[in-house]
Amino acid sequence: MPALELKSICKSYDGFVAVDQLSFTIEEGSVFGLLGPNGAGKTSSIRMMIGITLPDTGEVHMFGEPFRRKMLDRVGYLPEERGLYRKMKVMELLVFLAGLKGVARPEAERRAKEWLERLDLAEWAAKKIEDLSKGMQQKLQFIAAVLHEPEFLILDEPFSGLDPTSSLVLKDVLLALKKQGKTILFSTHRMDTVERLCDSICLVNHGRSVLAGELKAIKASYGKSSLQLEYEGELPFLHDTSVVQSFNDFGNYVELKPAEAADAQQVLRLAMQSARIQRFELVEPSLEQIFIDAVNPAKAVGAEAKHA
């Protein structure tokens, strides 16, 4: 039984179409990535999933039935914008929010202590929310989303504001929840995280789905059509469209897709003319490159690592 089904949902605001005929299915026990550039319609879609707004047309089904607000007792939601009561103390807030989901105070305190220790916030339990850093508040809001032990987690930019160590901890937590059979949807710009965690994805742009399905199948469909180079020096041929169809350059590492008339050996010869090559490999394109090509193929040539 799918945890969630969106069936041709649409949403407009004052004539602006935020979501346009969006459909996808999330299977129970899977991790699903909802991806897209800023303004693509991701948050608008999430708000319709959980009844904050209603679709103008289309249907939302959750746990195999048309959506009803009572279903939210089985859902944990982490919004992109924090909604914490800044004057409340950490433990006080967690117990209060768990109580709204029907968790008795003693049990809520027990679970809260465990989660605070797990996410390195135990020493802040008696502090006010306003005393916490941005990253700490993000971890606290995540705890609030999982404290009632929901079956389905919806996380909007869960890694926002986290340092690399905290991001790694959260990644491990999400993997542990997946092993417990939880269903997880998250929206993020972090393509490396999506590749490690997600079973399936939906890439949206201008409110519409432009790419959807199992992540492994999507990557396999592109074949080993990309080249990865680690180098020292310059690669002026990157801007030659007769050789390179698209590229993403990070300074000493580049991922590129050769033009139809070019091949890997030609690219290697050109690269060796102006740079010292440390690694040269034919690979499946990264999800980041697929993202760039799918969202804006006209601008894929010259995508020079100026991304979030």
Image (spheres, grey):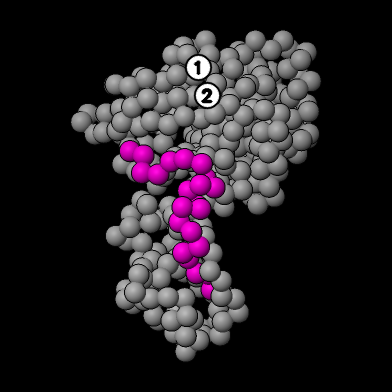
Quick one: quadrant of the N terminus? top right
Q: Quadrant of residue 120?
A: top right
Residue occupying image coordinates x 33% and y 37%: 207
- Left or right of 105: which side holds 64? left
**Residue 20 within the magenta-colored segment of the rendering:** no
Q: Position of residue 124 (x, y in %)?
A: 74, 33
Is 213 included in the stretch rendered in magenta?
yes
Camera-nearest residue between 276 and 189: 276
Mark 1 residue element: loop
Residue designated by label 2: 2
CA gap, disc 1 and disc 2: 6 Å
Q: Position of residue 139 (x, y in %)?
A: 64, 36
Residue 23: image quadrant is top left
Is label 1 in contact with label 2 (beta carbons under 8 Å)? yes
Please name the residue shown 56% across and 82% down the image: 277
Q: Can residue 132 be seen in the rendering of this structure?
A: no
Q: Earlier in the sequence, mark 1 or mark 2?
A: 2
| Residue farthest to the bottom, as pictured | 273
Tell me the residue at 76%/15% (across/down). Answer: 107
Q: Amino acid at mark 1?
A: Gly
Q: In the displayed image of the protein, which residue is found farthest to the left? A: 15
Q: Residues within 10 Å of mark 1 (few under 14, many from 20)?
A: few
Q: In terms of secondary structure, where does tag 2 sit?
A: strand
Residue 184 figure quarter? top right
Residue highlighted by disc 1: 64
Answer left or right for 72 relative to 180. left
Quick check: 55 left or right of 222?
Answer: left
Reply above or below: 46 against 172: above
What range of the chain is rendered magenta? 208-229
Q: Residue at x 43, y 31 (%)?
A: 24
Q: Vertical placement of 228 versus 7: above or below?
A: below
